[in-house]
């Protein structure tokens, strides 16, 4: 049973938003595009894994996707966590295309590219062993009952991912691709047969983990060494993606394709809250939306019914709290791609 469903990772959402406001000619734009391709691939890998684990017996496993915990200021993230009465299983999803060699001599993953070059990655099992150790310490710190922790590395199944192993000690017990995941989970069940906790306790642990889900705050501008001045801000045209749209008699009109967009400011202001800071002044709003006067800006801001503090020129408009309707959703981003 899924206790925590998989949703679009926040870093991916923020990078997509940042891309909207960065000019194509900006030196960071190609880096952003490359990172986005990697992040989407990573997400598709996690999604494939999440779809497979849905097929597991619902009563046997409690499942948490993209769980983020903090151990003494060390943030760590687990793609999928399965908890049963006998053990805990960490599953890390990988979505790497190419012929991949597990080098057991130097513990690295080598990709052979079509152009004859080679690329080296950290062996995902090394990453899993780190997570295994961090989670064990985290459970001890929270005085939770001991359950053995094991791990699996899952590769999204595509005909463009070929797994191979080199070296003498070719242990591939904890590596799988596609549906082989079920065989590897079954193998792990054979390693841990002893029932250690009752279903109520199992449920309690899973919900405790969920309550401690604590993502590391992301300052996406800082990560790319950008400031507000690098952004080409404004209302984005939903038809042709042009920024900025012009405000004319209560609606936004695209200067490029002439399409109207009545509520364009909502997304633009919400994106400002996500990228820059959780409050906005009249002056800041006028600047980012390219509005002609502060009176029009005030009307636009008031129409949003944002919580406010302060008066007159010092009034601060605050980010919506708990209002999902204005937040960027998985569907909106998927539609865009
Ligand atoms: Zn347009």
Image: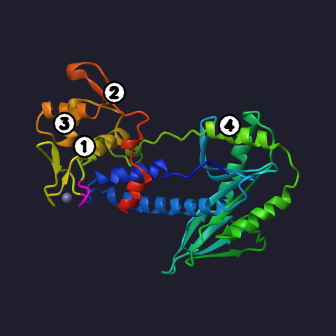
Crowding at mark 3 (Cα within 10 Å: few <14, some 14-19, many 20+): many
321, above or below 151, in the image: above
Image position, residue 118 (x, y; %): 54, 74
Crowding at mark 1 (Cα within 10 Å: few <14, some 14-19, many 20+): many
Left or right: 14, with 83 as reference point = left
Q: Check whether the beta carbons of the residues at disc 4 and disc 1 lie within 8 A of each other.
A: no
The tag on residue 208 is 4
The tag on residue 209 is none
Crowding at mark 4 (Cα within 10 Å: few <14, some 14-19, many 20+): few
Q: Disc 4 on helix, strand or loop? A: helix
Residues shaded magenta: 237-241
Marks 4 and 3, how far apart in space? 44 Å
Q: Can residue 33 be seen from the camera position used here?
A: yes
Left or right: 50, with 315 as reference point = right
Mark closest to the chain's N terminus, 3 or 2: 3
Question: Which residue corresponds to mark 3?
Answer: 286
Q: Disc 2 on helix, strand or loop? A: loop
Mark closest to the chain's N terminus, 2 or 4: 4
Q: Disc 1 on helix, strand or loop? A: helix
Marks 3 and 1, how far apart in space? 11 Å
Q: Residue at x 85, y 59 (%)?
A: 191
Marks 3 and 2, how far apart in space? 18 Å
Q: Residue at x 26, y 23 (%)?
A: 315
Image position, residue 322 (x, y; %): 44, 35
Q: Can residue 70 be seen from the camera position used here?
A: no
Question: Which residue corresponds to mark 1?
Answer: 265
Marks 4 and 1, how far apart in space? 39 Å
Q: Disc 3 on helix, strand or loop? A: helix
């Amino acid at each position: 049973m899924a206790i925590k469903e998989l949703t679009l990772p926040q870093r991916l959402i923020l990078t997509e938003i940042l891309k909207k406001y960065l000019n194509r000619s900006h030196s960071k734009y190609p880096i952003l595009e490359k990172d986005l391709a990697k992040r989407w691939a990573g997400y598709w890998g996690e999604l494939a894994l999440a779809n497979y684990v849905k097929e597991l017996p619902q009563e046997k496993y409690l499942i948490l996707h993209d769980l983020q915990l903090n151990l003494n200021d060390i943030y760590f993230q687990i793609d999928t966590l399965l908890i049963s009465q006998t053990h805990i299983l960490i599953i890390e999803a990988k979505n790497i295309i190419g012929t991949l060699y597990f080098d057991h001599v130097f513990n690295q993953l080598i990709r052979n590219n079509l152009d004859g070059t080679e690329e080296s990655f950290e062996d995902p099992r090394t990453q899993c062993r780190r997570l295994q150790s961090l989670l064990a310490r985290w459970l001890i710190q929270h005085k939770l009952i001991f359950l053995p922790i094991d791990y699996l590395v899952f590769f999204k199944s595509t005909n463009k991912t070929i797994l191979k192993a080199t070296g003498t000690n070719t242990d591939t017990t904890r590596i799988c691709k596609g549906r082989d995941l079920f065989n590897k989970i079954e193998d792990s069940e054979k390693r841990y047969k002893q029932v250690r906790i009752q279903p109520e306790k199992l449920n309690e642990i899973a919900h405790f983990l969920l309550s401690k889900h604590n993502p590391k705050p992301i300052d996406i501008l800082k990560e790319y060494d950008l400031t507000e001045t690098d952004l080409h801000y404004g209302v984005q045209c939903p038809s042709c993606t042009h920024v900025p749209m012009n405000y004319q008699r209560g609606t936004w009109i695209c200067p490029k394709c002439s399409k109207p967009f009545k509520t364009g400011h909502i997304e633009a202001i919400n994106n400002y809250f996500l990228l820059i800071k959780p409050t906005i002044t009249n002056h800041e709003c006028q600047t980012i939306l390219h509005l002609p006067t502060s009176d029009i800006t005030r009307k636009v801001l008031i129409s949003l019914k944002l919580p406010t503090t302060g008066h007159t020129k010092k009034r601060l408009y605050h980010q919506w709290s708990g209002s999902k309707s204005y937040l960027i959703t998985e569907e909106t981003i998927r539609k865009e791609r």
